């Protein structure tokens, strides 16, 4: 926890005129080390197509995360789409309306109809008790989300999937490094995906990964992300181009080297928020069986009006939190009308993610905290 003697919350906190506190800031690792990896790329002139750095990052991530059958791809959205293709998802998939838009848009893009069920009002994750009633003869999959890195009720979701012979693809875009009962949260399901976008805890500038339960699915996905090519003169599978390149992998290797420091810094910031805002706002209820990777700090206000008042005050003081996730995805205009998921609507209308990144200072963080507390 941040020592309050550094900067007391009661002390005046002023920002420089043009100093801006954004919701996140991309972590940039040691430049000298990055240059060393880039020198390797220049020495070989091998910049894509499963180069040595991609292979190295794959192996190191499998070890770090405690998983097998990991495939690096261009981004987290394509990770979802490849997982759907490999696992043969068609018809309908049950999913949550409280997520980043890619969870829904990736389904629609692949011709799969999202069927929304509501979320738990405390954990913000999909409510397993509502899944079974949404299953139809057209349902082929469940696509839950580990919201803000908070583990879904994977045990009950897996039971439902087995009972109805459904595939499970977990959107773990926020769940890098999270453990559930001493096991990688990403090892649950037929597949789990990660996003390595520049705003994430771990990033490769752009990028993502799929972790498959079965080796056979991994091997097929390797073909799919390279146009279905399995040799110089052989195309055996319908595919697209979803490969990670060597420059992305170089960034990932450097960031991975510094993960311990990143997590320590974020844990300190996260704890200061928790200790300073508990009792003022509703905080996400964490799954006690999973670890925290300190990816996000969401806060929930009593009303949308109060949220907008506080957000406007922050913006006027060069603080830019984010309404994340907003809007509830069952309201998207390119979908057929859906039964309103009222818990998701309520949460989406009242939630803000506060600034959280390694370089956020105590001085800056206290500015965020005081802005909220002064208006409550």
Image: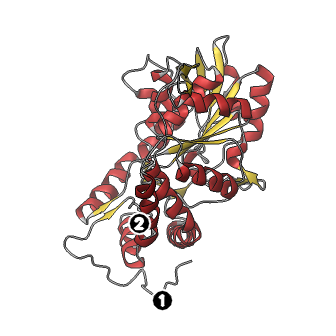
In the image, is residue 199 above or below residue 143? below
Q: Which mark is residue 5?
A: 1
In this rendering, would 295 be left or right of 20?
Answer: right
Q: Quadrant of the N terminus?
A: bottom right
Closest to the camera, between mark 1 and mark 2, is 2
Residue 275: image location, x then y, percent: 55, 71
**Residue at the spot x=42%, y=78% of the render?**
362
Residue 28 in sight: no
Q: SS at mark 1? A: loop
Tell me the quarter of the picture where residue 6 sits. bottom left
Q: Work out whether mark 1 precedes mark 2 in sequence or the reverse, and give the earlier one.
A: 1
**Residue at the spot x=48%, y=28% of the render?**
106
Q: SS at mark 2? A: helix
In this rendering, would 305 be left or right of 70?
Answer: left
Q: Residues within 10 Å of mark 1 (few under 14, many from 20)?
A: few
Residue 156: image location, x then y, percent: 76, 36
In this rendering, would 29 be left or right of 214?
Answer: left
Q: Residue furthest left?
A: 17
Count every numbered label the image shows and give the total: 2
**Along the line of sight, the residue nearer the viewer: 336 or 50:** 50
**Along the line of sight, the residue nearer the viewer: 125 or 29:** 29
**Residue at the spot x=80%, y=23% of the render?**
163
In the image, is residue 57 above or below residue 279? above
* Disc 2 target residue: 35
């Amino acid at each position: 926890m941040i020592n309050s003697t550094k900067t007391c919350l009661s002390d005046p906190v002023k920002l420089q005129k043009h100093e801006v506190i954004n919701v996140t800031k991309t972590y940039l690792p040691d430049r000298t080390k990055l240059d060393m990896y880039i020198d390797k790329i220049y020495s070989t002139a091998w910049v894509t197509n499963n180069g040595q750095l991609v292979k190295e990052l794959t192996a190191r991530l499998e070890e770090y995360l405690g998983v097998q059958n990991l495939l690096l791809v261009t981004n987290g959205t394509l990770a979802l789409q490849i997982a759907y293709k490999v696992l043969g998802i068609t018809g309908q998939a049950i999913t949550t309306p409280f997520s980043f838009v890619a969870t829904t848009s990736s389904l629609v893009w692949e011709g799969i109809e999202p069927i929304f069920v509501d979320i738990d009002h405390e954990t913000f994750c999909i409510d397993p008790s509502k899944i079974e009633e949404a299953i139809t003869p057209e349902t082929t999959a469940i696509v839950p989300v580990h919201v803000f890195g908070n583990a879904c009720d994977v045990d009950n979701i897996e039971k439902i999937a087995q009972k109805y012979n459904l595939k499970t693809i977990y959107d773990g875009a926020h769940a890098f490094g999270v453990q559930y009962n001493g096991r990688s949260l990403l090892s649950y399901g037929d597949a789990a995906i990660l996003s390595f976008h520049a705003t994430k805890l771990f990033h490769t500038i752009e990028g993502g990964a799929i972790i498959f339960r079965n080796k056979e699915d991994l091997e097929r996905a390797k073909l799919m992300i390279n146009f279905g090519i399995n040799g110089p003169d052989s195309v055996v599978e319908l595919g697209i181009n979803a490969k990670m390149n060597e420059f992305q992998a170089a960034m990932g290797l450097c960031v991975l080297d510094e993960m311990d420091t990143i997590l320590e810094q974020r844990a300190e910031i996260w704890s200061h928020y928790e200790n300073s805002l508990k009792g003022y706002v509703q905080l996400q209820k964490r799954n006690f069986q999973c670890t925290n990777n300190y990816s996000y700090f969401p806060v929930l206000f009593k009303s949308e009006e109060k949220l907008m008042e506080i957000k406007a005050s922050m913006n006027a003081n060069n603080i830019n939190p984010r309404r994340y996730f907003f809007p509830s995805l069952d309201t998207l205009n390119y979908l057929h009308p859906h039964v309103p998921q009222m818990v998701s609507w309520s949460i989406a209308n009242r939630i803000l993610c506060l600034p959280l990144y390694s370089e956020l200072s105590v001085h800056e963080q206290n500015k965020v905290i005081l802005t909220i507390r002064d208006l409550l």
